Amino acid sequence: MGILDIFGKKDVADDLTKGVPFSMKLVFRPYRLAARKNDAVDLIVELENKTEATLLVSVVVGVPKALGFDEIGMNKVREMRVGLMKGREKKEIAVPIYGHNQTVAGDYTVRVVAYSHYRDYAHVLNSVKKDTILRAV
């Protein structure tokens, strides 16, 4: 019996940290990148809150050094603050990914991590990580 049980309080954080809070689907539009050209694709992150609780959500996308989030390829990590997602709500986030003249043909791993937060964006409650492959031809 814990101290919170005496006052009739329920620890909601245990329910939110036990399971996976999100369902995440990743899609590239167009599905390939042109190698050795200044070309771009959009990574579409389809995120669904699988819980009944409202969550504060952010998404972090990381790319290898042959790609970038701007035309010259300087930025390799991008964080998007999605905001509050109600229970069972779905959101779609588009992230442009650029190739440049030093992007050779091949497969590149793109990592996407969705975080659920409490209080503010500095406090992480739970996360879901997913990798996908972007092909440059």
Image (cartoon, rainbow, N blue to C red):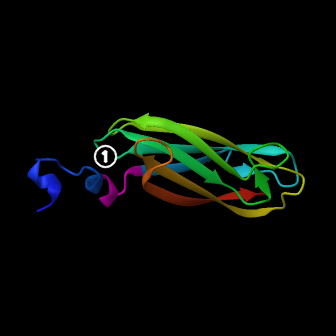
Q: Position of residue 116 (x, y in %)?
A: 43, 48
Closer to the camera in the image, 99 or 63: 63
Q: Say which quarter of the image contains residue 127.
A: bottom left
Q: Amino acid at mark 1?
A: Thr
Q: Is residue 21 magenta?
A: yes
- Dot 1 surroundings within 10 Å: few (below 14), some, or many (20 or more)? some
Q: Position of residue 25 (x, y in %)?
A: 49, 50
Q: In this rendering, is residue 55 above or below 66?
A: above
Is 36 left, or right, of 13 in this rendering? Answer: right
Q: Position of residue 129 (x, y in %)?
A: 51, 59
Is 2 left, or right, of 100 in this rendering? Answer: left
Q: Position of residue 92 (x, y in %)?
A: 52, 37
Q: How many marks?
A: 1
Report helix, strand or loop for mark 1.
loop
Is 5 left, or right, of 99 in this rendering? Answer: left
- Specify start and end residues of the magenta stretch as a single range: 16-22
Q: Residue at x 73, y 53 (%)?
A: 76
Q: Which residue is mark 1?
A: 51
Closer to the camera in the image, 31 or 128: 128
Q: Which part of the image, by quadrant, shows the N terminus? A: bottom left
Q: Residue at x 81, y 62 (%)?
A: 105
Q: Residue at x 76, y 50 (%)?
A: 68
Q: Which part of the image, by quadrant, shows the C terminus? A: bottom right
Q: Is residue 53 magenta?
A: no
Is 8 left, or right, of 103 in this rendering? Answer: left
Q: Residue at x 34, y 47 (%)?
A: 50
Q: In this rendering, is residue 31 above or below 87?
A: below
